[in-house]
Image: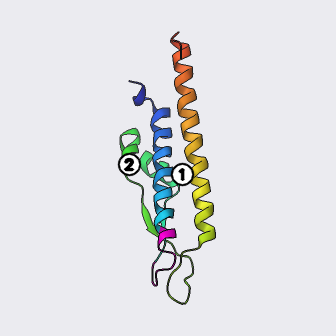
Amino acid sequence: MISDLKLFQVYSAMARHAAESQKVSATNVANADAPGFKAGEIESFEAFLARTMQSGGAQSMKSDFKVGISAAPADPNGNNVSLEREVFNSAEAMGQHNMALTVYSKSLDLLRTALGKPR
């Protein structure tokens, strides 16, 4: 099946990572004024790939992403959410998601062309 190809598994995981990154950023922004709130931080996609390739390859591509607590300095109220960092993380996740979907769809188009099937 097409979804068994490693290329599609990697870019599917990249799109899922971008969505999870957006979720973490949204949670952080929603709690930006909450005293004592510690911002969440998702592992990089590169770290996820390295971890999954060591622990079983393509089968573990569907595993969850590690989310930890940010070590950023805290305000006097104990909150360590930086809105500037969250805007940057959100924009980076959007770019990552767009790239994953573009490569995924263009690869499908290439396979269809190779098989002689019209779009």
Q: Can residue 50 be seen by looking at this rendering?
A: no
How would you classify the magenta stretch by its main secondary structure? loop
| Numbered badge on residue 55 | 2
Q: Residues within 10 Å of mark 1 (few under 14, many from 20)?
A: few
Q: Can residue 70 be seen by looking at this rendering?
A: yes
Q: Which residue is mark 1?
A: 46
The coloring applied to the image is rainbow
Task: From the viewer's side, name the closer residue of 91 and 69.
Answer: 91
In this rendering, the answer to whether 100 lies above or below 27 is: above
Per the image, label 1 sits on a secondary structure element best described as: helix
What is the x, y in percent for residue 90?
57, 58
**Which residue is located at x 50 percent, y 33 percent?**
7
Residue span colored magenta: 28-37
What is the x, y in percent for residue 78?
49, 86
In this rendering, the answer to whether 110 lies above or below 100 is: above
Task: From the viewer's side, name the closer residue of 52 and 88.
Answer: 88
The amino acid sitting under disc 1 is Glu
